[in-house]
Amino acid sequence: MGGGEFQGWPEHFQEFFIGLQLDNSKRYFEANRKVYQESVRAPMEALLTSLQEEFGPGKVFRANRDIRFSADKSPYKTNIAADCGMGGHGGYVSLDAKGLTAAAGRYELDKEGLEKYRAAAAAEPSGSKLGAIVERLEKKGYELGGEDLKRVPPGFPADHPRARLLRHKRLYIWKSFGLQPWLGSAAARDRVAEVWRDARPLDDWFSQHVA
């Protein structure tokens, strides 16, 4: 992980991603590898290092796409993403040509975890507590992700007061900041950290009822 001080992303990051969208090829990536390393990946590594003391170690995802089972054979992701302390306090961060996104919560639940989540979301008082947490986060401007079902799963009444939450197979919150002047400064760290801190009640709920 990069040990340099996080100072935001140089403006070249956007040029790199726009170019990659237009020419998603090894030729383009290799010709611009230095820009990727210095203006895209190194700042992301420095960001994770700056957040590690509070949120735990992080990991930058690889640039290559897994194309084995995909109809889209484009070799490279058109964003750079990382996670930090996922499964506890921490979250996810992504940067692309359109700007910065930060998120937190549970992106994957195995069968046992999903069963525990649904039981806790349906029951009292655990379910009401979850509903209140989600409501507060949405009032602060967060989007809610992971509602994968069109109907309430079998075993729960269709008119359950938390039917919406029961339709989730995973649950996370996210906020897209877009392109902001502060992306080129250390202030970007504070925006990411704020999202992850705001999500702590949600993380704590999952730790208590699902983990």
Image (tube, rainbow, N blue to C red):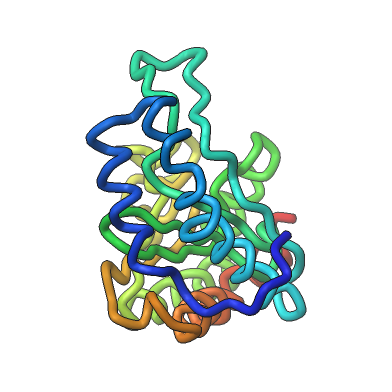
Q: Is residue 181 above or below residue 203?
A: below
Closer-to-camera residue (108/13): 13
Pinpoint residue 58: horizontal percent, then vertical percent.
69, 60
Q: Is residue 97 above or below residue 8?
A: above
Q: Nearer the viewer, residue 83 or 15?
A: 15
Residue at point 54% right, 48% down? 107
Q: Quadrant of the C terminus?
A: bottom right
At a point 26% along the width and 58% down the height, the residue shown is: 98
On screen, 115 above or below 135?
above
| Residue occupying the point 70% across, 39% down | 112
Residue at (49%, 42%) from the top-left corner? 33
Say whether residue 201 is left or right of residue 74: right
Q: Please name whichever residue, 68 or 49, is drawn nearer the observer in this view of the structure.
A: 49
Q: Percent x, y for residue 152? A: 38, 42
**Is residue 60 at least partly visible in the picture?**
yes
Query: Is residue 209 among the parts visible in the rendering?
Result: no
Quarter of the picture containing the N terminus is bottom right
